[in-house]
Amino acid sequence: MKKIVFSLLLVVFAFSITGCGEKNIEGSLTDIMTKVYEGIGEENLPMMLENIPLNEENFERYSFINMNYKEALASESMTGSIAHSVVLIRFDNASDAEKAKEEIKKNADPRKWICVEAEHVYVESRGDLVLLIMSNDIADQLRDNFVALK
């Protein structure tokens, strides 16, 4: 009887561990980026903000890493004197995202604009996504919005 109860407890425990993994966030990167900026007034957004699809030619310049990824999108001001960059990257799985998160943390350069520097640098992950934020006043809200995504 004890063996049966113990076996059942092990099965329940195994299911509870596998069920606690973080789910991937569904939707296109453009839709997710829109949600990351949600609630930030137009007057607080950097001037001339634009989404830039990332590819083999520009990925490392925006992400500061050289890794395989599924898709990536950067949101930056087209004015070079504004320190603002938000990079959203989707990987094949959560494990790759965690590895990338650590690499980005080590390599991100908040002075990439040379004449200006971002006050805040945040790197967050959710499931197969990694978000790099280098910005000033709105950085905390961007991070909070990403962390709150379902």
Image (tube, helix red, strand yellow):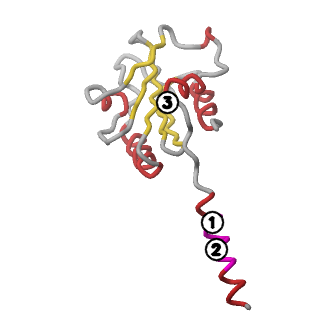
Bounds of the magenta segment: 8-16
Q: Mark 1 points at which residue?
A: 15
* Vertical comparison of 121 with 10: above or below: above
Residue furthest bottom as drawn: 1
Precedes in sequence: disc 3 or disc 1: 1
Residue 30 lies left or right of residue 103; in this view the side is right
Amino acid bearing label 3: Ile
Q: Residue 133 carries which label?
A: 3
Q: Locate residue 119, reporting x and y percent.
A: 50, 26
Say what amino acid the circle numbered 1 marks.
Phe
Q: What residue type is labelled 2?
A: Val
Q: How far apart are marks 2 and 3 (CA)?
A: 40 Å
Could you tell me residue 26's position as x and y percent?
56, 36
Q: State yes or no: discs 2 and 3 in contact (Cβ < 8 Å).
A: no
**Main structural element of the magenta stretch: helix, strand or loop?**
helix
Q: Do the residues labelled 3 and 1 touch (CB within 8 Å)?
A: no
Q: Name the residue under label 2.
A: 11
- Classify 36 as above or below 22: above
| Number of numbered tags placed on the structure image | 3
Residue displayed at 38% across by 25% down: 111
Disc on res. 136: none
Q: In which quarter of the image is the C terminus?
A: top right
